Amino acid sequence: MSGAVALVVAAGRGHRFGGELPKQYRLLAGKPLLRHCLERFLAHPAIDAVRVVTNPLDAALYEKATAGLALLAPVAGGDTRQQSVRNGLESLAADAPAHVLIHDAARPFVTAPMIDRVIVALGRSAGAVAALPVVDTMKRAAASGARIEATTSREGLWRAQTPQGFRFADILAAHRAAAATDLTDDAAVAEAAGLAVELVEGTEENFKVTSEADLQRAERVLAGAWEYRNASGYDVHRFAPGDFITLCGIRLPHDKSLEGHSDADVGLHALTDAILGAIGAGDIGQHFPPSDPQWRGADSARFLAHAGELVARRGGRIVNLDVTVICERPKVGPHREAMRRRIAEILRLEQDRISIKATTTEGLGFTGRGEGIAAQATATVALPAGLTAGPS
Ligand code: CTP
Ligand code: MG
């Protein structure tokens, strides 16, 4: 394997968190904590595969928490975090990637730009760790209690987070050499082996859920921080001889058909582009190139479902969709409700978030002359603010 693999450690027992359920399987915004970071790694274009290190006691929890995600098979962890990472690394050794990004399952808010920063730094350093400079004044307390013994300079002090990325061969060798120690992060293992580890910028939101209060904080981060994105899509298909068209997911008898590489569903194409636009994910042709024979005659529902999935993978949701079909014939009105129902079904969305409108062009232009159908659409999408985009 080349490229980069994300190794997510999730074998801990969460003693400090407490409770029956290990913290990585507790729900955050209705989704297991573990799943939040997995979706973020899976959605990142520079991450080729994701593997989770689990505790075999959690097998059923793991299956449920990761249902439908394209992950490598999980591997069993060990008694300490260091052993869990080691087991994960050993499991990748036979088909070793160039780089590995090690991440705590208990950090749900890893961001794409942070992953980028780690990977970019790996071009020049053996290791790179997301971290934040310490801003508070540092006090050392007496071992026995909370009385200050000394004030230490914060100069040069950073708080290490994950992801921690390394050249795979280097970190595997470092872990093998450090087998007798119990270090709390992989940077420490790398340092012990004399590897140069770079600090790259983490974020405050990338905190580790350690206690119940942290989980509440994570809920507040998600609840308060949505950003709304809007984009449009436009498409045209030409009429050709035939006896039906597919429009907004519905097959309609007609005295012509629509020409196109796929099923030529101009409505779903405009809509797919609007959704892709809202998440900055290019356009339909980029995801499903017309030059690729596998999309010949394809059901455009697949394209739309894919765009919806990309939104979900970013932790986002579709707020509303609006399509305007532009043609003289066929009449869209009688099919409007069926179209809304079908789009709602494809995207697993409430029907009242979907609007279908139609207009003629009063006989003017190519649509007026009955040469083809045009459609335009807008999509509004809610994404977790600052977590998937922007400088963080
Ligand atoms: N971890 C692991 N294997 C272990 C211990 C920890 O894979 N034997 C993982 C945890 O699941 C977590 C990450 O390492 O995602 C960071 O560890 P920590 O926050 O300390 O989690 P726990 O060890 O589960 O919590 P605690 O220390 O409170 O028991
Ligand atoms: Mg621990």
Image (spheres, helix red, strand yellow):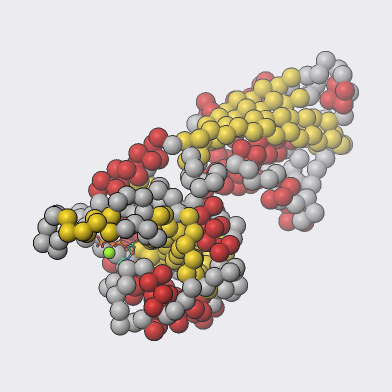
Coordinates of residue 383 in the picture (x, y in percent): 51, 39
* Residue at horizontal 54 percent and vertical 52 percent from the top: 113
| Number of residue marks | 0
* Residue at horizontal 45 percent and vertical 82 percent from the top: 173
**In the rendered image, which quarter contains the N terminus?**
bottom right
Coordinates of residue 84 in the picture (x, y in percent): 35, 72
On the rendering, which quadrant does ligand 1 occupy? bottom left
- Residue 192: tell me if it is visible: yes
- Residue 252: tell me if it is visible: no
> Residue 216 lies in what quarter of the image?
top left
- The answer to whether 48 appears left or right of 19 in the picture is right
* Residue at horizontal 67 percent and vertical 32 percent from the top: 232
Residue at the outermost left position? 144
Front-most of residues 151 and 43: 151
Residue at the outermost top position? 362
- 341 in relation to 294, above or below: above
- The answer to whether 235 appears left or right of 187 in the picture is right
> Residue 390 lies in what quarter of the image?
top right
Coordinates of residue 91 in the picture (x, y in percent): 45, 77
Front-most of residues 284 and 214: 214
- 357 in relation to 388, above or below: above
- 250 in relation to 167, above or below: above
Front-most of residues 102 and 299: 102
Coordinates of residue 105 in the picture (x, y in percent): 38, 59
